[in-house]
Amino acid sequence: MITPLDIENKKFSKQMMNGYSVEEVDDFLDDLTVDYSKNYKEITELRTKVEELNKSLQHYKTIEETLQNTLVMAQTTAEDVKNVAKQQADQIINEAKGTAQKQANDLENEILSKKKELDDVKKQFDIYKAKMESLLISQLELLKDINKEDN
């Protein structure tokens, strides 16, 4: 690429006849050098700016990738936590059912035991009642015998 300095230092060979006016060529080259300098400087600045923007773009792409990875990891973690919570809930429910069943079985056994005790007490009461009835009958007989003797 031709630099502004190349334009400024460009020398033309002079011809004797039908040549251009040196002053006009120099003026034109001066104008061209100024315009070209502006364009060259602007292009250099734009290239620098493009380079900076590309660096920024790469930086933001890296951030975006990190955020996407973080989001995926967060979603995975959320699913894992949800699954663990469901397993724990199922385990708690199963333990509660087991405990409730055991308590129901224990109560049923206790009821059966109390019924047996009640039956035993009823039998003892019936035996006691029969003994008392027998005693009362024998006492009544004794009183009758005593009354017969007295008469």
Image (spheres, helix red, strand yellow):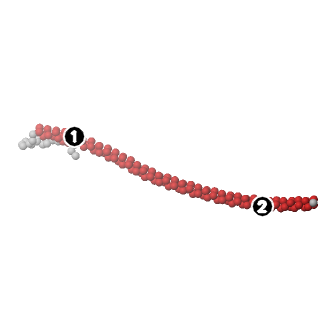
Whether residue 94 is visible here, answered yes or no, is yes
Q: What residue did someone put label 2 on?
A: 126
Which residue sits furthest right? 150
Q: Which residue is depicted at the point 93% across and 60% down?
A: 151
Separation of disc 1 and disc 2 at Cα?
Answer: 128 Å
| Left or right of 53 on screen, residue 31 | left
| Left or right of 123 on screen, residue 10 | left
Q: State the image coordinates of residue 127 (x, y, percent, origin top left).
A: 79, 61
Q: Which residue is depicted at the point 84% across and 59% down?
A: 136
Q: Secondary structure at mark 2?
A: helix
Q: Which residue is depicted at the point 88% across and 59% down?
A: 143
Whether residue 9 is visible here, answered yes or no, is no
Q: Secondary structure at mark 1?
A: helix
The one of 16 and 127 positioned closer to us in this rendering: 127
The one of 56 and 130 positioned closer to us in this rendering: 130
Sequence order check, earlier mark of 1 and 2: 1
